[in-house]
Image (cartoon, grey):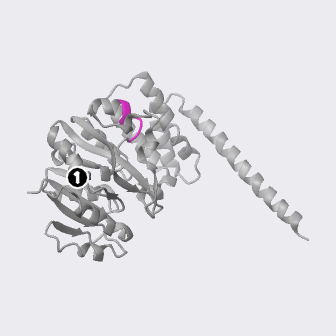
Amino acid sequence: MPSVSVIVPNYNHARFLRQRVDSVLGQTFQDFELILLDDCSSDESQSILRGYTVDPRVRIEFNEENSGSTFKQWNKGVRLARGEYIWIAESDDHADARLLERLVTVLDDEPEVTLAHCRSWQISEDGQRNGFMDMYFRFLDAHRWTVDFMADGREECRSSFLCTNPVPNASAVVFRKAIYERVGGADENLRLCGDWKLWAAMAFEGKIAYLSEPLNYHRTHDESVRSKSNRTGLDSAEALQVIRGILGRVTPTEAVWETLRWSAGMYWPWAIVSLHVPVGLKLAILRDARAIDPHAMRRVFRTALTAARLKLVKEFRLVRQRFEARQRQP
């Protein structure tokens, strides 16, 4: 049996697939199987993936109908996996050749570690580096993700996972299959925050380890699931669900409460004032927000005023531009 099962779940990422798969096959650690999944892509993905079946380590599994869920694909891949460890290598990312070697070594040496992850570069659609992914959660600790660490998972949930998802990309993670199965796998009812919920659940089962060497390259682009869903309010709704779930298992300090309320308050009030978010979802978001923030309505009013002010500024600029254009006419 292979030590690691590498799962590449794909949907319409043909333009990134060769770099993704080649970066897996080129790992310095070679004791793995590679499971290539496709969720009924409409581009050239399946043709590209079939080209890799000449390698005996490669298996392909294509859906006849689109599942509509990233996390259904994760669960399917893990069910097919034979390895002790799992690496879900997202189809639009790629990796340094030493990623598996470095993270597998941690899991081998530290049996209490449930998942090991590394620092990630954020890259553009054309592969340009745009800084590190941890720039988004430096508000927790400006220097934490610049050094290696191993930490108690429950404490990490209380201090970090409660406020944000400090494991922002699955491609940077190698975890134990047994722990994944113990916690019930990924929640298929979530579209965006299933990874956040999963990493927290696995952290509760032991320790987590982090390597500050950037071995993963996470691509952001307009066709990603998160980019398409950000305007609907679904990201805010699911984030608050995950936060409330973690709160049911930990008791945060007052300092963590303040950080949580501030960080959550940066996104959910905008969903409430948005014209694009359905009323039912707004009510669900507000209910969950009020459960964690006694000043939730105050945040909504402030955000509404800010939104109105921004709209007025935009309208004023448009009027001024039209006026100046008429003045220039002969």
The x, y position of residue 83, in whole percent, is 13, 54
Give the quarter of the figure containing the C terminus.
Answer: bottom right
Residue 249 is at least partly visible in this image = no
Residue with the most extreme left position: 1
Asked if residue 321 is positioned above or below residue 310 in the image, the reply reads below
Residue flagged by tag 1: what amino acid is it? Leu
Q: Is residue 66 magenta?
A: no
Asked if residue 118 is positioned above or below residue 129 in the image, the reply reads above
Q: Tell me the residue at 26%/55% (across/down).
A: 88
Give the quarter of the figure containing the N terminus.
Answer: bottom left
Is 221 on the left-hand or right-hand side of 60? right
The x, y position of residue 144, in whole percent, is 38, 34
Tell which of 93 and 29 is nearer to you: 29
Which stretch appears magenta? 159-165
Asked if residue 94 is positioned above or below residue 247 in the image, the reply reads below
Dividing the picture into quarters, in which one does residue 161 lie? top left
Q: Which residue is mark 1?
A: 100
Q: Tell me the residue at 58%/49% (across/down).
A: 274
